[in-house]
């Protein structure tokens, strides 16, 4: 039977100053096509970067295959064992070359798998296009945003004289071309507004739309839409809009960071620079900014983008390369991330290192849970995703890019066999994983970076 009422796949809720993409609804299915056909949902891909490596002895599970037990640092993923792959012995080979000590050559090439140009200026080169942008170039025209780049830290400038690299290399993992890194959005409010607010140039609005909820701005359109939907679709729309409302409410309670930052005097700023204290981190520490809440807001916004199919590709940086974020808000941690990662095998520092890594994995698990709770036909949004958690170093104390800490979650629409701990031959190119992910998305590439093959061990 033909539907009495049908809407397009790209139907949006609109109001003056707002534009909200909708998730898939039964009313969007073609006449005569069962909505379960949406099990062929598009696959979303996200790359989450954690700086400074991990405690290597508490990362890799002992047993291979499905019969593995999560280590201390991976324990927050206990409820997602069947959703993940722990991948061992992958290496970013091209991040090692003469003069490439430290972090920058590893982080800047993490998603390109090509050697970067050693420079202290702005004539930077990542050696190639990052895998997320290869994906975006192929499927980005099907969504509102080809890709989304999020993070917690601002771009850092200047030169790291210890290794002779510009700090620009540590501020981005996403490269549109070998010389063009993509800047990331670090403010949850701006990320949210970019996703849901729209303005018509030259049109005056009686009331400042920035002071209104985006849901209030589209409420009339939402009511009209829901009156024409079936019960199941009405429930889906209500759940989706309530999720937006929840994020928006939390954004209104994120503290007075801007006001605090504006009141930092030149004398204070000079002193912070003298003691090598990152000003952004200083603001977060003392302006009441909750780093965990800020992180989860960004992950919630990525969830909304994937849910509504506003974008299918994203990157998220928990911190810039060489991040020295203060983690004293965690029980048992007294210092800063980068300093602690150079633990020199000291027992106390190693324990703090483990707890910092656990915090990062907890946020990853939070993101996976959000995606798993969203139904898409007979699957979940997590089933229809590939969510990669990765660091550019195995151990921050040694700066080694061998046997990188990597977890891949999501079944890629049914093509990835999760629930395993898999170890490959030593020094297997990391690019092999990216080539596998590209092929999972039906982006047929013979090669990516220094790849040698696809990883048939993890595909269906």
Image: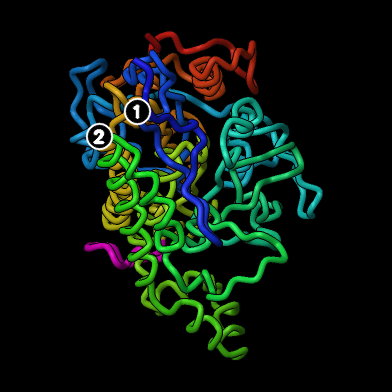
**Rendered residue at 28%/63% (across/down):** 333
Q: Nearer the viewer, residue 442 or 108?
A: 442
Residue 394 seen anywhere in this rendered image of the structure: no
**Rendered residue at 58%/90% (across/down):** 265
Element at badge 2? helix
Q: Which residues are magenta?
A: 325-336
**Rendered residue at 37%/27% (across/down):** 4
Q: Nearer the viewer, residue 6 or 48?
A: 6
Task: Kindly identify which numbered label has been placed on residue 232.
Answer: 2
- Check the image and report above or below for 91 versus 330: above
Name the residue carrying label 1: 26
248 in magenta: no
Name the outermost residue toward the front.
4
Q: Main secondary structure of the magenta part?
A: loop
Position of residue 419 in the picture relative to residue 434 (left or right): left
Q: Quadrant of the N terminus?
A: top left
Task: Please say if the residues under marks 2 and 1 sit with CB atoms less than 8 Å apart.
Answer: yes
């Amino acid at each position: 039977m033909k539907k009495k009422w049908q809407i397009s796949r790209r139907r949006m809720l609109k109001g003056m100053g707002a534009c909200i993409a909708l998730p898939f609804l039964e009313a969007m299915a073609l006449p005569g096509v069962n909505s379960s056909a949406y099990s062929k949902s598009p696959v979303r891909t996200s790359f989450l970067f954690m700086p400074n490596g991990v405690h290597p002895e508490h990362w890799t599970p002992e047993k291979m295959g499905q019969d593995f037990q999560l280590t201390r640092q991976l324990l927050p993923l206990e409820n997602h064992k069947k959703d993940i792959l722990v991948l061992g012995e992958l290496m970013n080979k091209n991040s090692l070359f003469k003069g490439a000590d430290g972090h920058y050559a590893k982080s800047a090439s993490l998603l390109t798998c090509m050697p970067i140009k050693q420079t202290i200026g702005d004539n930077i080169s990542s050696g190639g296009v990052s895998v997320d942008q290869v994906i975006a170039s192929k499927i980005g025209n099907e969504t509102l945003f080809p890709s989304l780049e999020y993070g917690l830290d601002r771009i850092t400038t200047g030169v790291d004289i210890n290794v002779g690299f510009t700090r620009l290399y540590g501020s981005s993992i996403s490269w549109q071309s070998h010389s063009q890194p993509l800047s990331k959005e670090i403010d949850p409010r701006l990320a949210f507004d970019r996703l849901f607010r729209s303005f018509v140039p030259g049109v005056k609005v009686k009331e400042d739309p920035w002071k209104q909820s985006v849901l209030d701005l589209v409420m009339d359109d939402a009511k009209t839409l829901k009156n024409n939907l079936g019960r199941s679709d009405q429930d889906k729309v209500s759940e989706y809009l309530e999720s937006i409302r929840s994020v928006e409410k939390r954004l209104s309670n994120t503290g007075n960071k801007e006001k605090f930052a504006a009141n930092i005097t030149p004398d204070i700023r000079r002193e912070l620079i003298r003691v090598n204290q990152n000003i952004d981190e200083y603001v977060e520490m003392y302006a009441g900014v909750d780093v965990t809440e800020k992180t989860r807001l960004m992950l919630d916004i990525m969830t909304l983008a994937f849910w509504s199919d506003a974008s299918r590709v994203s990157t998220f940086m928990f911190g810039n390369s060489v991040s020295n974020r203060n983690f004293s808000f965690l029980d048992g941690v007294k210092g800063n991330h980068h300093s602690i990662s150079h633990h020199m095998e000291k027992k106390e520092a190693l324990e703090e290192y483990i707890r910092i890594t656990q915090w990062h994995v907890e946020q990853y698990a939070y993101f996976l849970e959000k995606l798993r709770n969203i139904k898409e036909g007979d699957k979940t949004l997590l089933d229809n995703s590939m969510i990669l958690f990765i660091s550019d170093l195995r151990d921050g104390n040694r700066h080694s890019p061998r046997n990188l800490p990597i977890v891949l979650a999501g079944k890629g629409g049914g093509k990835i066999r999760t629930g395993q701990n898999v170890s490959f031959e030593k020094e297997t190119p990391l690019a092999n994983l990216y080539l596998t992910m590209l092929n999972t998305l039906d982006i047929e590439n013979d090669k990516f970076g220094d790849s040698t093959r696809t990883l048939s061990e993890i595909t269906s």
